[in-house]
Structures are given as C-alpha cells and as structure tokens.
Amino acid sequence: MAYDLEEQEQLASLKAWWAQYGNLATWLLVAGLAAYSGWAGWQYYIRTQAVQASALYDELQDAAGKKDNAKVQRAAGDMESKFGRTAYAGMGALIAAKSAFEANDLKTAKAQLQWAIEHGNDEYQAVAKLRLAGVLLDEKAYGEALKVLAGDTKPQFAAAVNDRKGDVLAAQNKLADARAAYKAALEGTDKKNPGRQLIELKLEAIGGTVPEQKPAAPAA
C-alpha cells in the first residue's frame, strides 16, 4: 500500500510539473528535432553538391585535356551557377581561364579569373589576381593590373605579388618603383626557390643590384 501511495505522489508531482512546464518542454523538443532535421538535411545537401560538382569538374578537366575550350566553358558555367559554393567551382574557373587564354579568348579568360576573385577561397583568389594582372599586363592595361594587385595579400603570395608588380612597373618605365618591387619579391622568396633567379635577372636588367644573401646562423 505504501508503494502505491508513493506512486500516486510521484504521479501527482509529474502532473503538476507537466501542467506548469509541459507546453514549454514540448516546444523545446519540437525545436530540437527540427534543428537536428535541418542540420542533417544540410549535411546531405552539402555531400550531394560535392559529389555532383566533382563529376562536373572531372568533365571539365577532361575537356581541358582535349583542348575543347567550348566544352570547358560550358562545364565551368554550369559549375559556377549550380555549385558556386564548392571548392570545385573556384578550381574550375582557373582551369577555364587558362583554356580561354590558350584559345586566345582573353575576354572569357578575364571573366573567369574575375569570378574566381569574387567567389573563390583565399588561395584561388590570390592565384586569380596574379593571372588576371598578367593578362592585363599583356594588354598594356597597366593601371588596371596594379589595381588588381592592390590590397591585402596573404603572406604566402606576397613575393609573387611583388614580382608581378615589378613587371607592371617596369613596363611603365617606372624603374625605381620596379626595382623596389623586385627587391621586396626577393626578400620574400626562399633562396632555394627556382623562380628566384628569374627575379634577380629582371632586377639586374633594369639597373638594380641583387641584395647579398645573409649568411645562415650557425647551428647551436
């Protein structure tokens, strides 16, 4: 009998709690289930997008290998419109730009590089800026090239940006500024980097002096 009484007391307490908090608990449970469902759905969407984007990227690469620029541009356009948030879209834009450049379609090449600058991750943006500045340099659009290279630069790309700035400034015959840019590029380029010798040659070609390498600190 005592056990039955204890059960009744617990049931009464539960009813009292439910009367006070039951509605809130139900809403919290529903909200939690909805949030989980939304998260699971989003994860599925991301995975599906990545798989589809990967397949389209493979198609783009295959077309690029066959020098089929028209197909490359179609695939890149599809990727940018349907899967623009994936990393594949940024990579695809860079490949599409290279394909268009090799096909002498500079307008499309610049458009693809601009897309990568506006939508790609930090690395793709930096690469796209360097390549777009190179195209503009070829077109003698020096002011535009320098604008593309302006702004914050990730440390790992600083030397390459300074090297490209030196190219543009040298083409403008702004030799003092070009020498300063090439020297900055050398300061940020490892002495084992094979590209360092080319920067040195360009610096010397416009009357600059290659800075002496500081001797390595002796091992402790």
Image (spheres, helix red, strand yellow):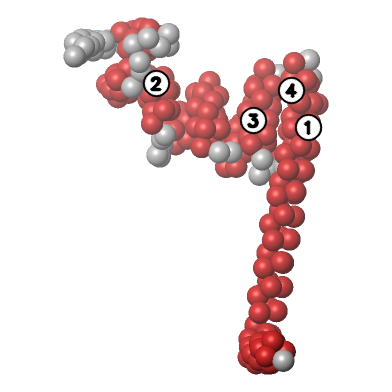
Residue underneath mark 2: 163
Cα separation between marks 2 and 1: 34 Å
Residue 170 drawn at (x, y percent): 37, 19
Give how far apart the Cα atoms at labels 3 and 4 are. 10 Å
Q: Which mark is residue 161?
A: none
**Residue 216 percent location from the top left of the image:** 22, 11
Q: Which sits in the foreground, 94 or 140?
A: 94
Q: In the structure shown, which secondary structural element does the residue marked by tag 4 occupy?
A: helix
Q: Label 3 amino acid? A: Met
Q: Nearer the viewer, residue 36 or 169?
A: 36
The residue under label 4 is 61
Percent position (x, y) of residue 20? 63, 91
> Circle 3 sits in a helix, a strand or a loop, which is it?
helix
Q: Amino acid at mark 1?
A: Leu
User: Would residue 112 be seen by someone viewing this image from the given angle?
Assistant: no
Decide: is 116 above or below 45.
Answer: above
Q: CA distance from mark 4 to mark 1?
A: 9 Å
Q: Amino acid at mark 2?
A: Asp
On the image, numbered disc 3 is attached to which residue?
91
Disc 1 designates what residue? 56
- Residue 75 falls in image quadrant: top right
As measured in the structure, the alpha-carbon distance from the residue carrying label 3 to the one carrying label 2 is 23 Å
Q: Are marks 3 and 1 in contact (CB under 8 Å)?
A: no
Q: Residues within 10 Å of mark 3 (few under 14, many from 20)?
A: some
Which of disc 1 and disc 2 is earlier in sequence?
Answer: 1
Quadrant where the C terminus is found in the figure: top left
Circles 2 and 1: CB atoms closer than 8 Å: no
